[in-house]
Amino acid sequence: MKFLLKLIQIHRRVRQGGTRYSVLVVVMLFGFFLEAYMHNFNLVYITLFFVFAIAYSAGPLGLYNIGELDAKFSPRGRLFANTVGELYFAITNNSKTPAWAISLHVNTLSSLVGRIDGKDTKEASLSITLPKRGEAKEDECYLQSFFPLSTVRFVLPIKGGYDTLVYPEPLGIPLRSFLQKQAMYFGEEKDFDGLAPYSGAEPLSRIHWPSVAKGETSVKTFAHEQSTQELAFTFVDAGKNDEQRLSQLCLWVLECEKSHQSFSIQMPNKLIKSKKESIDAILEYLARY
């Protein structure tokens, strides 16, 4: 009785649909019925009811398999426009028995989750590339399973889908090349401390010619080659249009974060300083601009 009541509750949450195998089962049942009716073979009757019982039992078993799951979007990491990223979902199995053959779907994308043990939570991820910066929402998120016979497709919608922020695509001139053009670096050519890959923007005097002879073009770097002032970026000078400027600034912000360099960005209506705002807050401002 409890199992029946549970199935009724689950039935309200789970959508069901037929598959090509369900059509095959219908054809088999119809064929067995004609064979039994025309020839009155007991073996055919037994086979008919055996196939019917198995096909019928797939419904309750499949409902119980997926109906005890709960899933929600679990924000993690950063997503950038036109860059492959990961969406994470936490899937909880409230049943004591394992859930089998579960897959995660977001619109037309899918990822296999597999088995989820009873009373356990499993994290599932799905690779996605979002074309635009700003807020990204999708309500068409669901869990799916064909367990146990692939004759019925069980779909459990994920309440709320996902809602996340997409940052501008980090694209443009590398920070090192920009600073060299701005003449913010200094160093003695006879006293360099290391080598760095040649980006194409460095002057010929910085090229390490012995490395060129070995087939690996590098440029000289200096331990004291640091800016003596806070880096200052200007929105207007960062590109030819708004999207290009935002992408360029996003790249520089990420490079400054990696090198622990403080900076400021002069936006049209605001001056952003890394000493007063976090990197995530700055990236969010660029994403929502």
Image (cartoon, grey):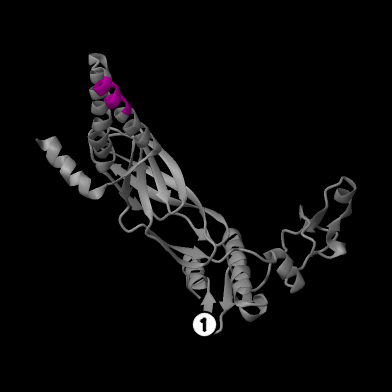
Image quadrant where residue 21 sits: top left
User: In this picture, is 154 found above or below 232?
Assistant: above
Residue 258 located left or right of residue 124? right
User: In this picture, is 226 found above or below 239?
Assistant: above
Can the viewer see residue 82 in this picture?
Answer: yes
Residue 6 located left or right of residue 55? left
Residue at 79% of width from left, 57% of height from top? 198
Image quadrant where residue 123 sits: top left
Residue 134 position within the rendered picture, expressed as x and y whole percent measured from the top left:
48, 68
Comparing 252 with 109, the one in front is 109
Residue 209 position within the rendered picture, expressed as x and y whole percent measured from the top left:
89, 53
Comparing 259 with 137, the one in front is 137
User: In this picture, is 222 found above or below 56?
Assistant: below
Can the viewer see residue 148 in this picture?
Answer: no
Q: Amino acid at mark 1?
A: Lys
Comparing 137 with 59, the one in front is 59
Q: Main secondary structure of the magenta part?
A: helix
Residue at 27% of width from left, 21% of height from top? 38
Question: What residue is pinned by disc 1?
Answer: 270
Q: Is residue 35 magenta?
A: yes
Range of magenta residues? 31-38
Residue 23 position within the rendered picture, expressed as x and y whole percent measured from the top left:
36, 36
Q: Quadrant of the N terminus?
A: top left
Helix, strand, or loop for circle 1? Answer: loop
Task: Point out the residue furthest to the bottom here.
Answer: 269
